[in-house]
Amino acid sequence: MAAQRTRQPTRRWRQVVRTPLGAGASLLMALVLLLALVAPMLWTDQADAVDTGNILAGPSAEHWAGTDNLGRDILFRSLVAARLSVGLALTATAIAIVLGLLLGTAPMLLGRRLGRLVTASVDIAVAFPGLLLALFFAVIFGVGARGAVLAIGIAGAPSFARLVHTLVAGVAARDYVAAARAAGVGRVRVLLRHVLPNISEPLIVNATIGAGGALLSFAGLSFLGLGVQAPQYDWGRLLFDGIGALYVNPAAALAPGLTVLLAGLAFNLFGESVAKGLGVATLGHLPERRSAGPATSGPPTIRAEEPVVAGDDEAPVLDVRDLWVSFPGADGPVQPVRGVSFAVRRGEAVGVVGESGSGKSLTALAVSRLIEEPGRVEAARLQLLGADLRTGSERAQRQLLGTSLAMVFQDPMTSFNPTRRMGGQLAEVARQHQGMTRRDAFGRAVDRLAAVRIPEARRRAGQYPHEFSGGMRQRAMIGMGLMGSPALIIADEPTTALDVTVQQQVLDLLQAIREADDVALVLISHDVTVVGEVCDRVLVMYAGRIVEDLAAADLATGAAHPYTRALVAAVPDMETDLEQPLAVVPGRPVAPGEVPAGCAYAARCPLADDRCRAEDPQLASFETPDHRVACWHAGEPIPVDGPREPAPVDPVELVEVDAP
Amino acid sequence: MSTPRPTSQSARPTGRPTAELRFEDVTVRYGSARRGHTAVDRVSLTVPPGQVVGLVGESGSGKSTLARAAVGLAPLTGGRVLLGGAPVPTRGRRRPLQMVFQDPYSSLDPRMTIGDSIAEAIPPGPSREERRAEVARLLELVHLDPDRAAVRPGLLSGGQRQRVALARALAGDPQVVIADEITSALDVSIQGAVLNLVRELQRELGLSMLFISHNLAVVRYVASHVAVMRDGVIVEEGPAARVLADPHHDYTRALLAAVPGTRTPRRTP
Amino acid sequence: MTTANSAVASTPATPTSGPQAGPGGRLSSALTHHWVRFAVRRLARLLVSVWVLVTASFLMIHLIPGDPVRGAMGPTAPAELVAARREALGLDDPLWVQYWDYLRGLATGDLGTSLISQLPVADVVAQRLPATVSLAALAFLAAVTVAVPLGVTMGVLTRRGRGRRTELAFTTSSVVLATVPDFLLGVGLVYVFGVQLGWLPVAGNVGPEAYLLPVLSLAVGPAAILARIIRVEMVTVLEADYVRTARAKRLPAPRVYLGHALPNALTAALTLGGLILGAMVASTVLVENVFAWPGLGSTIVSSILNKDYPVVQAIVLVYGVGVLLVNTTVDVVLALLDPRSMIRED
Ligand SMILES: Nc1ncnc2c1ncn2[C@@H]1O[C@H](COP(=O)(O)OP(=O)(O)OP(=O)(O)O)[C@@H](O)[C@H]1O
Ligand code: SF4
Ligand SMILES: [Mg+2]
């Protein structure tokens, strides 16, 4: 989903001008417009002065770009031509925009049937290049400036209509339009109040670029002799006249040529830099990604150093100590994962829960070495099956990770390559890491698909991902992990995108694999109940830390951290008391860039005191060695405020909040 | 049902009696007659006055289509939607049936202040001053600071946005509100607050409500009746306590069995 | 380490896997089914477009204000002559009769007669077409050959917000190159290589070196735009979940980029790229005029200026068909590369 923009419009525009490219383009643009405005007032006389003694002369001190066949000064003519050229281009663009807006919004205003007809016609027209359309209309409207304006304007309309249509459709699909319509707001009003304002920026940007295009198209038509006719002259006409004398006085063609080029560049570069500054997509341009939140308070000073697994003879499958993940932010690095330590024993199922943004996924990606530049991962220890993942040859690591670690991601719809068949995507693993032949690898892929209970595996292996249902894809993803012989499966919200009944199948499958071969599982979920059901142990994360590590069976009653307790109580289950309001975690999660001193949960914690706000509690054993909690008041009773008053008015803090 | 809790809010000023929402043989088809697909297939369902009916089912079962058909966002292929015995108006400014949408990040116009978004849904008539007062009252009703009416949704969290969306729905002075998966895009910690608010508003204002969710535990918490939908058809319907404790249909049983946490947690030996 | 799976494989593969197993049987013929539907739909669209094109070119002559024959022959031509020419062209028949005749003519390869030279238009087109086709085809090839590797490389280098400087340099220079119109570039090249250096021929199409400058002028802009689009698509695709999956499979980087990212980036780029490549066909008009290229482009301009409408009509038609053929080819390639694109159009 696109991030909602919250910066003030003026500030955002100012940012455009602040980049060197943006500043240069704006300057050039202002120059061109100024020239168009004042040049005819200043230099018309010089431009029209005939000097018969100086015909077709080359550049001289008197005539910097030489003269034409009547001895008129080329440079002044090029300057004066700015007004006609720019004026014609803007008029043509205006025609294109008006027609484009009419055609592009028609489907929304006219309703289904008529709208579809308009869209289909626009689709057909858009396939024909603008130049061809312009020639066509130039024939109809006749040779000359007026004909060319109409021709270029109408020729530009289809692509504008297509753009408007796409933008309108994008906004019209948003729920706020549906909400306005459901509230009885009329179509025209919805268009004016909701749709047009939300598409105005890309429209303006593309109109600017379109004006540059029109300027150059005009030059093209005039250059062919189909545009402006003598005695009027625009840049194209001057070029047309000059090119005949290219061998005599090249400047006669080059001067207007360069001027029109500069003007065209001014429009295009200005449009592009505005697009970049505002984060608007144009042809071949990505909207700027928002950087992650504001600054952190410098590098960490306290680092936890404590034994993680107590009294265990066998080496853990995964051993992580003091894991940090950082990304460069606008004002210094931000640390979404801050010193996470845990171990996973053979065959153990460990759940990771926490609110959105608490660092669950990044922890998973970090331990599986999937965080890319510019992200940085640091750890005091990071071992898979005893092998250090921080060092070692890239080849050996790839082999180890490729065969012993299986990953399952959240969205089965987007996690397979849509252009390749399922069987091949699985087989690739065996070919890469087990050196199998194509045929053997495919055979194994079919076998693995069958193992994850995909019926008719052989036929299914020949299909594309979009032919699989969501649940089947997630099973196939697990099957892909089983191409090797994994000792650990890391599943990041594997069932969040699935229906409950399908979720159950996937969880059962993971369970069966675990029991069959003693495979360990790290299951990330925001759903406490899922984790409680599937896992042996649960890690609760808050603001990039593990705040509690406890047995899953203790979740409901034995949790000691106030956050864990609130998380469990906030979720209704099939036994929740219907007469009581649900527990509420007040406030909002801490963004990685703004972690306070002391306990990160203090602002939302009913037990918080001065010590909490000053000192950061470390993860330490609580009551039993296997139960670890990071809280100064672990296990203390939480004050219950009598019969609940209606919740207090929630102050709307003025902080930027990004869409997830 | 439990008795409404006492509240500091005054009763609804307009005090329109709530009405019954009734779907009669509603069918919605998408696409052409030959290649199309029936999203909702002759569904009949009643939301009694002042009651909350929970509609559960998996993705693609037609829940949202039914809701959108009721407010006129999806075309009815057959059947009727009646409000207090008369067809639901899907034209004009008075809309006694209001809807709250799933995604709080897409249901508020990012360029409009939340006050304007709410005011837009107030039926025409009141003066500018009266509208402003009404917006303030509505914001207070959903526990948001009325002084913040001039804020744009970009500054709000998901839960706060969903409360604005609720306020906007109430601005239309509805007799029935349809809530379509209003908590599924929210974090669990925020979900609780929104559910509490829904129950509180429903009880205070005596609204009738169709509460759509795929989460049985959530539906159990807010609804007095439950309807189970699958492939465009309602397969089971009845009082929440009965349906959840003693399901008659196999599909309902499958859904209940799949609710996480209903099976005993596993322990490693 | 134990070899996993043995036991898992032995767990019975339950064929009736609950309500979700759903559309199993229906999927078997789905892909061929989609192909047929796609082919039918694409053909229908091509036919409609051709019909629109033919009708538009027919109507062109009738939309011109005033009498086109009088316009072509000039104000001094005797009225009888004009009337006779109108008669010969059938301009006095009812519109639908003329339309029918026009369609019948097209079907039999009769494009009418030039008002100026009195030659059959079909002969003019046949004589000029090869020069234009070879120019467009070469430029097309050159643009694609340069743009694809360049765009892919740039995409990889600037993925995930890396290489900000490289990105800025590339984006800026590609905007500049894409802005330079082909005819201006042509004029510049003529000046440098013809006038100043005298290295290369600047007119006509005799000999292979005559192709160099026209192809260059024609290909640079589209190549720049195409490379930009491919870069953007590549950057987007490299963020996709399935690329993360490919990395989680621990494939070597080249396989991730070329095997998984590139096909998807290309299919996305092709949709827009098709329009740009189609536009190249029309751009030959300007470039041919710069280089006095004996193709359709120089002919259409002189014919417009001479008001030789039958020739203009025919050449517009030929260009339009050329564009449509390029677009259709692109769609088919797209469908071959990405089977979803067939379905998406539904
Ligand atoms: N590439 C990145 N650059 C900068 N910040 C990032 C990046 N990826 C993630 N973050 C930030 O790190 C924090 C933790 O992200 P993470 O994805 O691990 O959360 P999560 O717990 O998995 O949340 P969710 O439940 O939404 O999946 C978030 O605040 C996110 O904005
Ligand atoms: S340390 Fe203090 S603020 Fe933090 S969770 Fe414990 S009691 Fe609450
Ligand atoms: Mg995550």
Image (cartoon, rainbow, N blue to C red):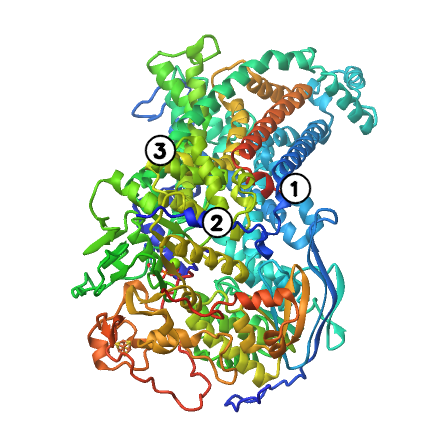
The circle drawn on residue A61 is none
The amino acid type of the residue labelled 2 equals: Val
| Disc 1 residue crowd, few under 14, some 14–19, many 20+, Cα 10 Å | few
Q: Which residue is mark 2?
A: A452
Asked whether residue C194 appears in the rendered view, the answer is yes
Secondary structure beneath dot 3 equals loop
Front residue (pair C129, B193): B193
The amino acid type of the residue labelled 1 equals: Ala
| Disc 3 residue crowd, few under 14, some 14–19, many 20+, Cα 10 Å | few
Do pointers 2 and 1 mark residues of a single chain? yes
The residue marked by circle 1 belongs to what chain? A
Pinpoint residue A363: horizontal percent, then vertical percent: 31, 57
The amino acid type of the residue labelled 3 equals: Gly
Q: Which residue is mark 3?
A: A435
The quadrant of the rendered image in which ligand 2 is seen is bottom left
Mark 2 or mark 1, earlier in chain: 1
Mark in the foreground, 1 or 3? 3
Pinpoint residue C153: horizontal percent, then vertical percent: 35, 34
Mark 1 or mark 3, earlier in chain: 1
Secondary structure beneath dot 1 equals helix
Mark 2 and 1 residues: CB-CB less than 8 Å, in contact? Answer: no
